[in-house]
């Protein structure tokens, strides 16, 4: 009977030891997994912030370029408008001078010989 109790006690002790050992290993494993998860999460956020900063910098640069381009386009539009106005004014002046010239030539062409003589005499005397 003592031998049976001893075997039973050893068996129970062995089972308790296995359970306690298993719980200890499980606890250590769980702790290692938790630490690995924390490190992975920390690294993920580092990479996320690095990428976010990189893209924010690029976006800021692109916004500055866009602003500069808008300024250049506006300035160019003002210059083109000014040149168009100058061209229009000069065209108007040229047309006015052509009209005056054509009127004078027409007047001269319509004069008789005596009228031309009188015209040039009056002009150069």
Image (cartoon, rainbow, N blue to C red):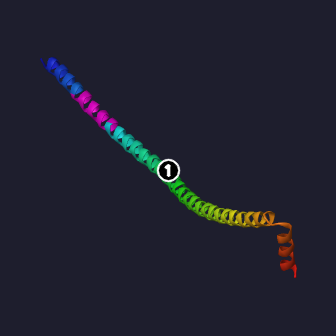
Instruction: Judge from the rendering whether residue 90 lies leftward or rightward of residue 1; answer left or right.
Output: right
Where's residue 107, x and y in %? 76, 66
Q: Main secondary structure of the magenta part?
A: helix
**Which residue is outermost to the bottom?**
125
Check the image and report above or below for 41 versus 109. Answer: above
Q: Quadrant of the N terminus?
A: top left
Where's residue 91, x and y in %? 68, 62
Element type where label 1 sits in the image: helix
The foreground one among 6 and 64 is 64
Check the image and report above or below for 109 versus 124. Answer: above
Instruction: Judge from the rendering whether residue 66 lies leftward or rightward of residue 49; answer left or right.
Output: right
Check the image and report above or below for 84 versus 17. Answer: below
Where's residue 50, x and y in %? 48, 50
**Which residue is outermost to the left?**
1
Where's residue 39, x and y in %? 41, 44
Q: Residue at x 21, y 29 (%)?
A: 16
Q: Residue at x 35, y 38 (%)?
A: 33
Q: Quadrant of the C terminus?
A: bottom right
Whether residue 28 appears in magenta in the rendering, the answer is yes
Check the image and report above or below for 3 versus 103. Answer: above
Q: Residue at x 17, y 18 (%)?
A: 3
The foreground one among 28 and 67 is 67
The foreground one among 30 and 19 is 30
Q: Which residues are magenta?
A: 16-29
The residue labelled by disc 1 is 55
């Amino acid at each position: 009977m003592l031998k049976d109790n001893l075997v039973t006690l050893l068996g129970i002790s062995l089972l308790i030891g296995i359970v306690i050992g298993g719980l200890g290993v499980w606890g250590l494993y769980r702790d290692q997994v938790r630490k690995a998860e924390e490190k992975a999460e920390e690294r993920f956020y580092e990479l996320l912030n690095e990428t976010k900063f990189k893209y924010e910098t690029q976006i800021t640069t692109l916004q500055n370029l866009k602003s500069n381009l808008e300024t250049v386009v506006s300035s160019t539009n003002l210059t083109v408008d000014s040149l168009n106005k100058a061209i229009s004014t000069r065209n108007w002046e040229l047309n006015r001078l052509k009209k005056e010239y054509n009127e004078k030539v027409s007047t001269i062409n319509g004069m008789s010989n005596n009228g031309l003589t009188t015209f040039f005499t009056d002009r150069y005397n």
